[in-house]
Image (cartoon, grey):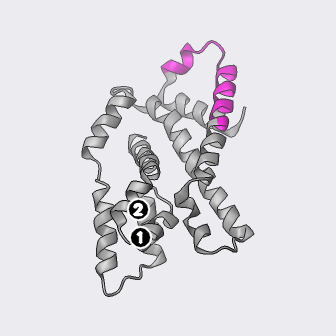
Amino acid sequence: MNHYAIRVRDHWTQHAPERMAALEDPERFFSDLGAQIAAEVSDLAGRLEENPALSVEMRRSSGQTYLKDASRRMTARKIAEEVMMNQHLAWAGDPSLPLDQAREEWEQTRASDENLIAWAERAQDSPYPMHSTVELEDKATEWALPTEFLLGLLEAEIPREYLEANREVLAEAATIRFLREVH
């Protein structure tokens, strides 16, 4: 049983004991589920590694270093783990609202992507456009976006076009934020 399986099993034990009791072979169920999660994490991490938002830094300088490459891969892996684990843990916590209905409700009340455009435009219009690393990291955490993505947004001539060109990154970030709130 891998660490994903152990984490899900512990979550079920705490939040869904009736579902645990209903399992015929819990050991096999969680072993299979852990293997499935590991495969999903690897797949998503691979797709994120190729994501243009994580590659903004690489385009800036042609001499990509080993550390930048390792950082990009680690970031992609951590995001993938967070998304997949939240996806597999979220529904076990509160079954009162199906996940798809909860997502629909969340979409209606979440912060609009227009807020990111307004933030970038204000920063570009500011006489002091430099942002601290801490501010960028806080914004990246809040929006579940890589800091490189936000830097690309700030550097874009037209922030709205940058967001449109990277719509899939925003969709993935929205999923991460949703799963954080549900869990």
- Looking at the image, which residue is at 51% across and 19% down? 19
Q: What's the magenta region?
A: 18-39
Q: Which of marks 2 and 1 precedes in the sequence?
A: 1
**Which percent across, then down, holds residue 159?**
36, 66
**Disc 2 designates what residue?**
162
- Looking at the image, which residue is at 52% across and 33% down? 88
Mark on residue 12? none
- Looking at the image, which residue is at 55% across and 40% down? 85
Residue lying farthest left?
109
Q: Residues within 10 Å of mark 2 (few under 14, many from 20)?
A: some
Question: Can the viewer see residue 6 in this picture?
Answer: no
Asked if disc 1 and disc 2 are in contact, CB closer than 8 Å, the reply is yes
Taking depth in this image into account, of 59 and 41 the one nearest to the observer is 59
- Main SS type for the magenta part? helix
**Disc 1 designates what residue?**
156
Left or right of 145, for residue 112: left
Magenta span includes 169: no
For the C terminus, the quadrant is top left
Q: Secondary structure at mark 1?
A: loop
As shown in the figure, which amino acid type bears the numbered disc 1?
Ala
Residue 121 lies, with reference to residue 145, above or below; the image says below
For the N terminus, the quadrant is top right
- Looking at the image, which residue is at 30% across and 82% down? 126
